[in-house]
Image: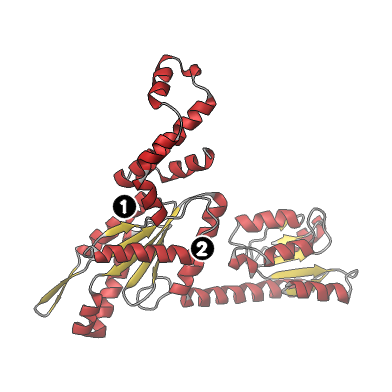
Amino acid sequence: MVVDDSRVIRLAAVKILQKEFDVIEAEDGEEAWDELQRNTNISVVFSDLGMPNMDGFELLEKVRNAEDPVLARMPVIIITGAEESDGTKEEVLQQGATDFISKPFDSVSLKSRAAAHINYRNEVQTLEKAAALDKLTGLLTEASFRQQGDQSLAYASRHETVFSLVRFDIDHFSEVFVKHGKNIAEQILAKVASLITEGKRGEDIAARLGVARFALLLPGSDPQGAEQVVSRICQRVSRLKLKMGKDVFSINFSSGITTPVAGDESTDFNALLVQAENALKQAVAEGGGKIVCYQSAEAEVSDKSIAEQVQSVGINMEEILIKLSENEAAISDEQLNLAMQKILPLICSADKRLRLGLSKVVAHLEKRLK
């Protein structure tokens, strides 16, 4: 991408680069920043410093402080003119500029810088991708998964969307490892990982956190949706029968699911992992092969006291229903609000027990009825 308020400079750069590269133009830093957030195919930025709306200094600062780590490491080459002093260049370097090129630039310098930085960036991304994957299973490593989890949680909190975190363990896997050795154990793990990959949705993120410990991030899934995905994977895994000598080994997963409250910024990803682990422990304690959704102690107490909560809101529900059937306008907004507060605990409990898939609706109601 070439960023310059001079149309002549942009056209000159495009003419030099267009035979070997796809070139995007931007008139100022503001336009460039919008494009960078939309277009993940941009590999290097050439930017002027003096521009209206948002100058090169501000653009560079935004890039280096971007939440997306890939964007934050974007090569930014500053286009300098005769008016730029050595002090200005030093300031831009300290701010994180990758390189400089002077106006008027020649074709060899411009193309060589573009090629060098794009090739280097591609090599780094290839190495990072390889390092992020578990060699045996091809799933994400724990470190990469935690990074993805932090990003997913930040996105969900900012946009008040939902996602779920799942922890799987292969039941009694240590017994197989001890009895049949590392080679057989690794064959099982590789096969199980392939079944997880086949069973998850395209947008879901799978990882191996330990020897036989797996995890999933499910964007856009409430507990009911997450349970459907997990059930599908568990069914695939349970159909896998491995014959080892006289023994036939059936594989089962114990699973724990947790879903943060939409818009809640107080929970970090480590806390969610602990919640999923606690739900997983409960699944194991119940005999294995179970799927358990995490429920906080506060939620359990809330379920037990539904009747008290319903009675605590001072409004006669029977009277409200009669009035609604006769004349809807006879009920004030305040009365409707109180009525909704009164039945909300009932809706919450029904959603959890009957798996109605209303978690987004409940979260929205809780927020609006405060």
Q: Residue furthest right?
A: 83
Q: Amino acid at mark 1?
A: Gln
Q: Nearer the viewer, residue 252 or 317?
A: 317
Total labels drawn: 2
Query: Which residue is depicted at the point 35% across and 78% down?
Result: 136
Q: Residue furthest top?
A: 326
Q: Which residue is mark 2?
A: 268
Q: Does residue 14 appear anywhere in the picture?
A: no
Query: Which residue is depicted at the point 35% across and 49% down?
Result: 224
**SS state under label 1:** helix
Q: Is residue 288 above or below residue 225?
A: below
Mark before the other along the chain sequence, 1 or 2: 1
Q: What x and y, as percent, mark residue 35?
A: 66, 55
Q: What x and y, as percent, mark residue 320?
A: 42, 23
**SS state under label 2:** loop
Q: What x and y, as percent, mark residue 139?
A: 39, 70
Q: Does residue 167 appear anywhere in the picture?
A: yes
- Say which mark, if any, is on residue 54: none
- Say which mark, if any, is on residue 228: 1
Q: What x and y, as percent, mark residue 357?
A: 37, 44
